[in-house]
Image: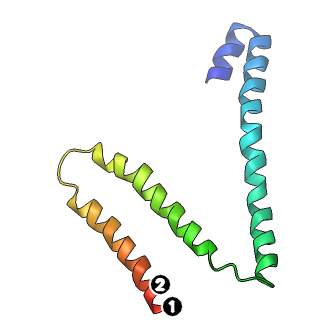
């Protein structure tokens, strides 16, 4: 809508707005391209080295996402949050159980 609105004012302004919007996406997309590369490199390294310690980082990332993104979202809503936090706690217990059974 911003690009269309700018183009209605002046086509050059519309093109400039489109270029600016596209350019701000480039760094994000370039870093996203490294995701499969990192996966392949890790898989290749796993053929010779033990990389099971990386599971800790993965679990930590999911805990961080749950604690920093989801919990504040739950707090926005009025009412009881017991069910949400119980589900979060069940997820933590499930991860611990998987670790203990491994």
Location of residue 60 with respect to 79 vertically, above or below = below
Judge whether 83 appears above or below 4 on screen. Answer: below
**Does residue 88 appear left or right of residue 9 in this picture?**
left
**Badge 1: residue crowd in 10 Å (few <14, some 14–19, many ≥20):** few
User: Where residue 52 sits in the image (x, y, percent)?
Assistant: 64, 80
Label 2, on which residue?
A: 99
Q: Quadrant of residue 54?
A: bottom right
Q: 37 and 19: which one is in front?
A: 37
Q: Quadrant of residue 5?
A: top right
| Residue plotted at (38% across, 72% down) | 92
Count the numbered circles shown: 2
Residue 102 badge? 1
Residue 53 falls left or right of residue 47: left
Tell me the quarter of the picture where residue 96 sits.
bottom left
Q: Residue furthest left?
A: 79
Q: Are marks 2 and 1 in contact (CB under 8 Å)?
A: yes
Disc 2 is placed on an element classified as helix
């Amino acid at each position: 809508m911003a690009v269309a609105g700018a183009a209605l004012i002046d086509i050059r302004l519309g093109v400039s707005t489109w270029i600016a919007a596209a350019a701000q996406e480039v760094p994000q997309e370039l870093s996203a391209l490294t995701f499969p590369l990192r996966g392949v490199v890790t898989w290749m390294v796993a053929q010779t080295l033990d990389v099971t310690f990386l599971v800790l980082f993965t679990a930590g990332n999911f805990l961080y996402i749950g604690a920093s993104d989801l919990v504040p979202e739950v707090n926005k809503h009025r009412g009881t949050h017991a069910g949400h936090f119980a589900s979060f706690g069940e997820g933590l217990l499930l991860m611990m159980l998987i670790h203990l059974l491994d």
